[in-house]
């Protein structure tokens, strides 16, 4: 039992460290991390995504995801696709192998870190998942999916207030996420006892 408590304390400490890193980064200008043309494209797409009057936000979301999934190298894109395929086939251990090769060879590719975090989470490896989410968010602070993944992990380890902050940061970046809105409403009730 002591070993389990010690392990949980390490996971919680890692979660807090990731959250401390991720949330301030989400408020920073991510353009410094990207090449000029791609940064301008993403800036325009994020402006469209956050516009409450934009009825074509799904296209903006898809275009952002498309840009995120492009590493700039055909070989690295192949490793990414293999990692995705392994996750789709419910083989997260194989996905970790492909995505580890990807992150080793393309350490500045945020989506590689994010997808490997998903694979680690599915294998039950919370610490490595949190570390990869931190890296993904350091490279792409507007990665709403990484932030909601962080919220899920933090909630799993009983850190509901921190999870609520992560989900709220995700929603601020992509306000059309109904599932995240539901998580926020539920966690708000649990944390404060008050409905939104």
Image (cartoon, rainbow, N blue to C red):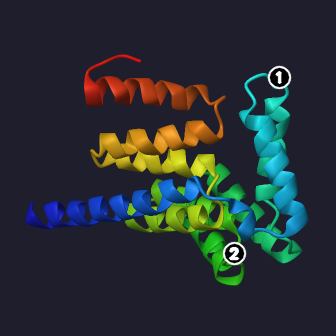
Asked whether residue 99 is in view, the answer is: yes
Looking at the image, the residue that sits furthest to the bottom is 105
Q: Quadrant of residue 85?
A: bottom right
Dividing the image into 4 quarters, which one contains the C terminus?
Answer: top left
Lateral position of residue 57 relative to residue 192, left or right: right
Q: Answer above or below: position of 149 versus 36.
A: above
Secondary structure beneath label 2: loop
Q: How many marks?
A: 2
Q: Quadrant of residue 108?
A: bottom right
Image location of residue 62, percent across then percent down: 81, 42
| Residue drawn 85% across the image and 35% down it | 59
Looking at the image, the residue that sits furthest to the top is 195
Image location of residue 173, percent across then percent down: 63, 42
Q: Quadrant of residue 76?
A: bottom right
What is the CA distance from the residue labelled 1 to the residue labelled 2? 32 Å
Given residues 177 and 122, the one toward you in this image is 177
Q: Answer above or below: position of 88 versus 135.
A: above
Looking at the image, the residue that sits furthest to the right is 37
| Residue drawn 55% across the image and 69% down it | 135
| Residue drawn 78% across the image and 22% down it | 53
| Residue drawn 71% across the image and 78% down it | 106
Residue occupied by mark 2:
108
- Say whether disc 1 or disc 2 marks the residue closer to the N-terminus: 1
């Amino acid at each position: 039992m002591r070993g389990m408590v010690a392990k949980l304390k390490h996971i919680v400490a890692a979660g807090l460290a990731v959250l401390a890193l991720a949330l301030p980064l989400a408020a920073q200008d991510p353009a410094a991390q990207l090449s000029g043309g791609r940064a301008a494209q993403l800036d325009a797409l994020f402006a469209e995504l956050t516009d409450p009057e934009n009825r074509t936000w799904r296209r903006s979301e898809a275009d952002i995801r498309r840009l995120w999934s492009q590493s700039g190298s055909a070989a690295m894109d192949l490793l990414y696709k293999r990692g995705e395929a392994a996750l789709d086939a419910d083989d997260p251990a194989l996905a970790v192998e492909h995505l580890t090769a990807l992150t080793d060879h393309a350490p500045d590719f945020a989506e590689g870190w994010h997808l490997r975090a998903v694979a680690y989470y599915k294998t039950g490896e919370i610490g490595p998942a949190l570390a990869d989410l931190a890296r993904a968010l350091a490279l792409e602070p507007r990665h709403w999916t990484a932030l909601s993944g962080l919220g899920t992990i933090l909630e799993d380890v009983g850190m509901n207030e921190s999870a609520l902050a992560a989900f709220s940061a995700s929603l601020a970046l992509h306000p059309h996420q109904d599932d995240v809105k539901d998580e926020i409403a539920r966690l708000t009730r649990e944390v404060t006892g008050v409905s939104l």
